[in-house]
Image: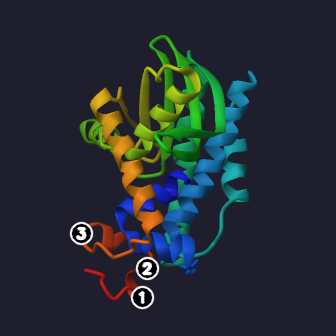
Amino acid sequence: MYKRQIDDYLSCPLKYRLRHQAHVPTPPHHALVFGNALHQAVALGNGRRMRGQTVEANDLEAALEAHWRNEGFLSREHETARFEAGTKALQRFADDSGQADDAIIAVEQPFSVRIGEDRVRGRYDAVRQTDAGVVITDYKSGDMRDPARARQRARSSLQLQLYALAWEAEHETGPDAVELHFLEGDVVGTVTPTRKQLDKARERVETAAAGIGAGAFEATPGYPACDWCPYRRVCPAAA
């Protein structure tokens, strides 16, 4: 299973079936366009840092533009505003990269590990070697500005817990920390998952695998999952 499949099944089994089995197409959404283009630009910057090269804001903006798609935006003005927000986030990222004293040791590195009886696949956005040890970073495009809320998001993130489990499976020891880096808001939430949290994450992987194997795809409508679901308009159970 891929990490996204686990997330989708636990969010709503019917969403998993529509996306990963029925392959029901969804209309483009501006948040996905923005997030993907920003993600690609950051990966370029981190790759250059890993090779000992300077990260230039102009190059990151060019990558943002190369991966940009003018689909799903509310208006031309909305698209322009979002592109400008992306360039500002990348300028800060380039400035921070020039002052960083850590080392990037992996960028977009895939993993495929056994978690319990199940194989889980995914990729780390970035892995850094810092004075505090190994830190796995997942980049988010959201405009998060509250450090306490960012830490809470990181603490409850199944995605980060799966990263920690995957790193542990590969290296026989977990990372020293995992973090969510919210690019637009320039806020980072950093945590060290507890053994209790990681055990719970294993259970959630088992739950998803068992449900998928049993063909259990009943909808689990509710807030906020339905509000963000791309299948809301075609789902008879949408709340």
Pointers 1 and 2 in contact (C-beta within 8 Å): yes
Q: Mark 3 to mark 2: distance in Å?
A: 14 Å
State the image coordinates of residue 234 (x, y, percent, origin top left). Answer: 42, 88
Pointers 1 and 3 in contact (C-beta within 8 Å): no
Q: Quadrant of residue 47?
A: top right
Residue with the mark numbered 3: 223
Category of crowding for the residue at label 1, using alpha-carbon neighbours closer than 10 angstroms: few (below 14), some (14–19), many (at least 20): few
Q: Mark 1 to mark 3: distance in Å?
A: 17 Å
Relative height, residue 182 to residue 22 (above, below): above
Residue with the mark numbered 2: 231
The numbered mark, 3 or 2, whose residue comes first in the sequence reads 3
Q: Which secondary structure lies at badge 2? A: loop
Relative height, residue 18 to residue 175 (above, below): below
For the C terminus, the image quarter is: bottom left
The numbered mark, 1 or 3, whose residue comes first in the sequence reads 3
Relative height, residue 237 to residue 165 (above, below): below
Residue type for callout 3: Tyr
Q: Which mark is residue 234?
A: 1
From the viewer's perspective, tell me whether residue 163 is left or right of residue 103. left
Q: Residue furthest top?
A: 131
Colour approach in the figure: rainbow
Residue drawn at 59 percent across, 47 percent down = 121
Residue type for callout 2: Tyr
Q: Decide which of 54, 212 is in the foreground and name it.
A: 212
From the viewer's perspective, tell me whether residue 49 is left or right of residue 229. right
Q: Which mark is residue 150?
A: none
Q: Mark 1 to mark 2: distance in Å?
A: 6 Å
Q: Which secondary structure lies at badge 1? A: helix
Relative height, residue 119 to residue 28 (above, below): above
Q: Is residue 194 in view?
A: no
For the N terminus, the image quarter is: bottom right
Category of crowding for the residue at label 2, using alpha-carbon neighbours closer than 10 angstroms: few (below 14), some (14–19), many (at least 20): some
